[in-house]
Amino acid sequence: MTAATRSRHSCYSYKDRFLPLRKNVREFIPDFPESHSDECEYVGKDFDVSLSKVLSDAIAHYKFLAMDKEVLGGTPRIAGTRIPVSMVLDAVQHYGSLEGAIKSYPDLIPDQVREAISFASLVLERSAEDEFTTSFG
Amino acid sequence: MNLRLLLDESITDVLAQEFKSMSSLNVECCRELSIKGASDPDVIAYAVKERRIVVTTETGMHDGPFPVCTHPGIIVLAGRSRHESIHAGNFKKFMLSGHRKEAKDAVSFISQSEIRIKTHKENKKFPI
């Protein structure tokens, strides 16, 4: 990430997360900037990231999930099986419960299904998490 | 003659039972064999040894990594609607379409709208 992008992300986080606090801050720091609009430009989230990096970063957090080029062509899956995370999510979507996914895949345990759902969430939130880390160290 | 199939682990239990109930199929499931959790090449090697067509939902198992005629066939249950009842319905339509014999030594994609069969000679596409 370039310095310019980092600066814009700082602005993004500042504006979105702390704008409501600015009024209070000015009571204690009179020269606190009124606005950042001249210094930086608002941009949305940074989605210009490699999907394979997002997936491999995310999967490192889960003990029941794995990715391996030799198995399912590298698709994220339940470790020790050939069951893709995406199919587990489909089963949860269809049945509306963890138990439904286990009905579809009787060899799975609830913790594996929970991790599959959590993984999907983490992948979608990864971009925002990266901005937060960049902004606040 | 029965179609000999090897169901990948991504095929749900409900769908596997549907396949097993079809009298025109001879079915084995990866998860009931020693190849549970095996790599793609190991699954294909087992299919070659047992002369079975691999049935999977994994779109990465196609003629790129596994060229046509190096295995007995791969059938990919594709499409956006991936629920087991939809897959079962699509597969039944495929079985009744008159094209099932063409799945041997080929890579076939079955979706809600069409069947695509890639053989060593040509690519065919049929509405389902």
Image (cartoon, coloured by chain):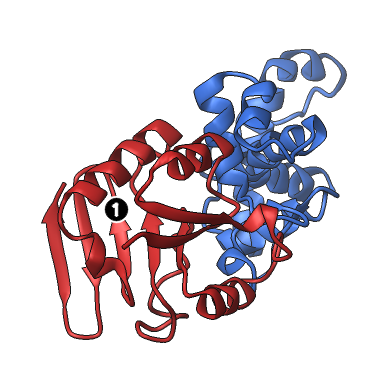
Chain colours: A blue, B red
Residue lying at 86% horizontally and 49% vertically, measured from the top left: A63
Q: Nearer the viewer, residue A131 or B103?
A: B103
Q: Nearer the viewer, residue A67 or A22?
A: A67
Q: Residues within 10 Å of mark 1 (few under 14, many from 20)?
A: many
Q: Is residue A99 above or below residue A104?
A: above
Percent of width and height locating residue A44? 50, 41
Q: Give coordinates of residue B33: x percent, y percent.
A: 69, 60
Q: The N terminus of chain A lies in which quarter of the figure?
A: bottom right
Image point (38%, 77%), residue name = B63
Q: Is residue B122 above or below residue B18?
A: below
Count of numbered tags: 1
Q: Based on the displayed image, in which of its 4 quarters is residue B98 positioned?
A: bottom left
Q: Amino acid at mark 1?
A: Ile
Give how far across and how far down residue A132 sits, in percent. 74, 41
Q: Quadrant of residue B92?
A: top left
In what element is the residue under mark 1? strand
Q: Residue at x 48, y 44 (%)?
A: B20
| Chain under callout 1 | B
At a point 56% along the width and 56% down the height, the residue shown is B28
Residue A24: in sight, yes or no?
yes
Q: Label 1: which residue?
A: B110
Query: On the rendered structure, is B98 left or right of A54?
Result: left
Is B110 situated left or right of A21 in this image? left
Residue A34 seen: no
In the shown orientation, is residue B106 left or right of residue B126?
Answer: right
Residue B105 position by quadrant:
bottom left
Of B93 and B50, nearer the camera is B50
